[in-house]
Amino acid sequence: MIIATWNVNSITVRLDQAIAWLQNVQPDVVCLQETKTIDEKFPESRFAELGYQSYFYGEKAYNGVALISKLPVENLTRGFFHDSIPDAKRFISGTVSGIQILNCYIPNGQAVGSDKYLYKLNWLKALKTHIESSCKSTEQVLLCGDFNIAPEDIDVYDAAAYGGEIMCSAAERQSLEEIRAWGFTDAFRKHTQESGKFSWWDYRAGAFRRNLGFRIDHIWVTPSLAERSTNTWIDKEPRKLERPSDHAPVVAEFA
DNA sequence: ATGGTGGATGGTCCA
């Protein structure tokens, strides 16, 4: 069983890359973020040709998430059950082969202290509430997506220079840690403690070539699923292509 | 020095 997450930064622009990647990697499920298109324009037929069913929750120009699956999806939900946060198309979930998959696009937050930063913290609180009310940590739950947070200093290319900035600030990390403490393990960190492993590199200043990145895309799992976790890796290949997404896919394999 | 890139948009906003 292979489950992946990938912020594609526009499914319209990245469609051919996404299709080629699915053909190569053959995941059972891929969770997409920043699809940036309305549901009426989601290119579901291209995925259907490969045997994948698409479930999407999008909007014009910004945000947008999708669940693409080879296997049947049950209990599909879009957005949170409660409305404690202004709506944005940032969350979709469904159960595949007994695994409750939560696909989220956590707000970027722009800069520490900004209005968008406060929105990010509130959104994290809403996510925690949603998980508490709709999931059980004793079951197989997988939380993945673009978290826009580097959990530890080893997930940042230059933590000293970047200390306390957006994606690394103490309040963001604490909010995320509270979600983790509900019952998740970072599937990637089960398999390696290496630093310098990143999933996002700024388009500017040759950041990818110089490996000036951040590990902000994650796959987290509850204990019963962590036991099944045989490997998790970041696939840097799509980031090397012409006109890439700024994010690389993260892939988790389960026995 | 305030850039540098990219996507959606149709002016700027967002990342």
Image (tube, coloured by chain):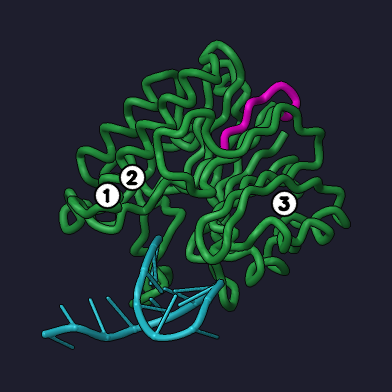
Chain colours: A green, B cyan
Looking at the rendered structure, whether the residues under marks 1 and 2 are on a common chain is answered as yes
Give left or right: position of A90 versus A200: right
Which residue is pictured at 62% across the width and 44% down the height? A4
What's the magenta region? A96-103
Q: Quick check: is A97 in the magenta stretch?
A: yes
Q: Name the element at disc 3.
A: helix
The amino acid type, in three-letter code, at marker 2 is Lys
Q: Name the element at disc 1.
A: helix
Which chain does tag 2 point to?
A
Q: Which residue is mark 2?
A: A120
The location of residue A193, given as percent across then percent down, is 38, 37
Residue A162 sits in quarter:
bottom left
Calculate the distance from the C-alpha at mark 1 to the C-alpha at mark 2: 5 Å
Give left or right: position of A23 versus A219: right
Which chain does tag 1 point to?
A
Which residue is pictured at 35% across the width and 31% down the height? A125
Give left or right: position of A31 versus A248: right
Looking at the rendered structure, whether the residues under marks 1 and 3 are on a common chain is answered as yes
> Would you call the spot at circle 2 few (<14 residues within 10 Å), some (14-19), or many (20 or more)?
many
Label ID, residue A117: 1
Q: Which residue is mark 3?
A: A25
Residue A237 makes an appearance in the image? no
The location of residue A25, given as percent across then percent down, is 72, 51
Q: Name the element at disc 2.
A: helix
The amino acid type, in three-letter code, at marker 1 is Tyr
Mark found first going from the N terminus, 2 or 3? 3
State yes or no: discs 1 and 2 in contact (Cβ < 8 Å).
yes
